Image (cartoon, rainbow, N blue to C red):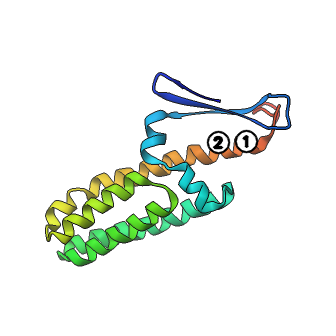
Amino acid sequence: MIALINDRVYFRVWKLESDASPLCCMRLPFVDILKHLDLVRLGETSGFDASLEEEFHESFRTEGVLILRAMDEALEKGNIKEFGEQAHKLKGSALTIGYPEIASTTLRMETICKANNLERAALLLPKLKRQMLHIDALMGEYFSFHARLSEGPGESKKER
């Protein structure tokens, strides 16, 4: 069951073989789920394997930090070609694992670089950095949700 209440989406998941008792309920901002995460794409990429999704995200985060550093360095050197190439790299990674807003921002950066306007592309860098932090926080909640799912029915924090 999925319910939308006060701009928040609530998920309740049941094991099919159970007597319809809920395993857990997840509450994430509705807009954040739809705007920042393409969970279907992430699932398709990982074969719907939660541990593989975590690996993909960790790899994206690690690569993202390196790319952002390279973008900062390219900006300092005034190297528009390198800046655009790094934006392109991050866009590809974001599209692969389902982070459409990051992909959209990096596409804009890449397009602006192709129009030979490094200063304008650089204006999007703080936004991109905020998006990366936000995705990391959302994915933390998402992975916490998967951890609660694996606890099984009837387990609670008091029982652990």
Residue 83 placement (x, y as % from top left)? 26, 72
Residue type at mark 1 is: Leu
Q: Which residue is mark 1?
A: 149
Residue type at mark 2 is: Phe
The residue lying at 24 percent from left, 56 percent from top is: 124
Does 148 sit left or right of 61 as displayed? Answer: right
> How many numbered marks, from 0 up?
2
State the image quarter where residue 148 is shown.
top right
The answer to whether residue 152 is above or below residue 66 is above
Q: Which residue is mark 2?
A: 145
The answer to whether residue 30 is above or below residue 112 is above
The residue lying at 80 percent from left, 39 percent from top is: 152
Does 65 sit left or right of 55 as displayed? Answer: left
The answer to whether residue 107 is above or below residue 22 is below
Q: Is residue 73 visible?
A: no
- The answer to whether marks 2 and 1 mark residues whose Cβ atoms lie closer than 8 Å is yes
Residue 158 or residue 123, whichever sits in front: 123
Does 109 sit left or right of 14 as displayed? Answer: left
